[in-house]
Amino acid sequence: MPRKTTSSLQRKVSPDRKYQHILIQRLINKSILDGKKLVAERAVYYAIEAAAKKLKHDKPVEMFEQVIANVSPNFEVKSRRVGGANFQIPFPISGHRQLHFAMSWLVQSARARSGMPYRERLALEMVDAYNQTGNAFKKKEDTHRMAEANRAFAHFAR
C-alpha cells in the first residue's frame, strides 16, 4: 500500500438524499454511532436547518459550506525526530485532510456539549462555527497557533 493516498484508493462518497451534496453526506458518515445511519442523517438534516433558521440564512447548504470553511485548518504540526530531539514541524494541509479535520472537530465538539439531544448540540456548534466561535473553531485556532509558534522548524520538513 502506498504511503501517499492516490485517487484510486479514495472512496467515492455519493451525495446525500435531501440536498444532493457530498459534504453533507460526509458529515452524516462522521456522525454515525452504532451503525445507525438513518438516525445520524435525521440529526444532521435537523441541525443544518435549525442552524440556518437561527442565523436567518435562507440557503442551508451555503451556510453549511461557510461553517466547514471556518473550521478547516490550513496547517498542522507533526512530530519529527532530528538529531536526538523531537520537533513539532508545521506542514500545510489541503483537500480531503482539511475536510476530515473540520468534520471530526465539529462532531467531537458537538458530542462534548451536554444537556440536550445531539441534533441540537450539532446545530449550536454550527452556529458557533459560522460566527467563528465555539470549540471546533478554537481547535483550528490552536492548531494554527502551534504551527506559527514552530515556524522556525519548518526547514526540517522534507
Image (cartoon, helix red, strand yellow):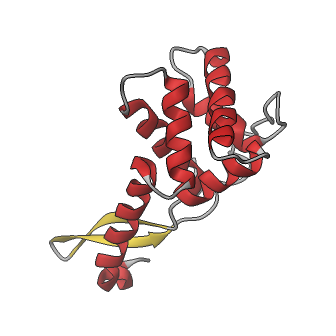
Determine the residue positioned at 66% across, 36% down: 48
Q: Quadrant of residue 18?
A: top right
Above or below, 43 against 75 in this view is above
Determine the residue positioned at 44% across, 49% down: 136
Q: How many labels does the image show?
A: 0
146 vs 51, left or right, is: left
Percent of width and height locating residue 99: 59, 51
Determine the residue positioned at 75% across, 51% down: 62
Which one is in front, 16 or 63? 63
Residue 96 visible in the current orientation: no
Residue 107 visible in the current orientation: yes
121 vs 55, left or right, is: left
Percent of width and height locating residue 15: 80, 36
Above or below, 67 against 41 in this view is below
Residue farthest along the left direction in this orientation: 84
Which one is in front, 63 or 89? 63
Q: Quadrant of residue 31?
A: top right
Percent of width and height locating residue 152: 30, 85
Percent of width and height locating residue 158: 44, 77
Determine the residue positioned at 34% across, 62% down: 142
Above or below, 85 against 71 in this view is below
16 vs 30, left or right, is: right
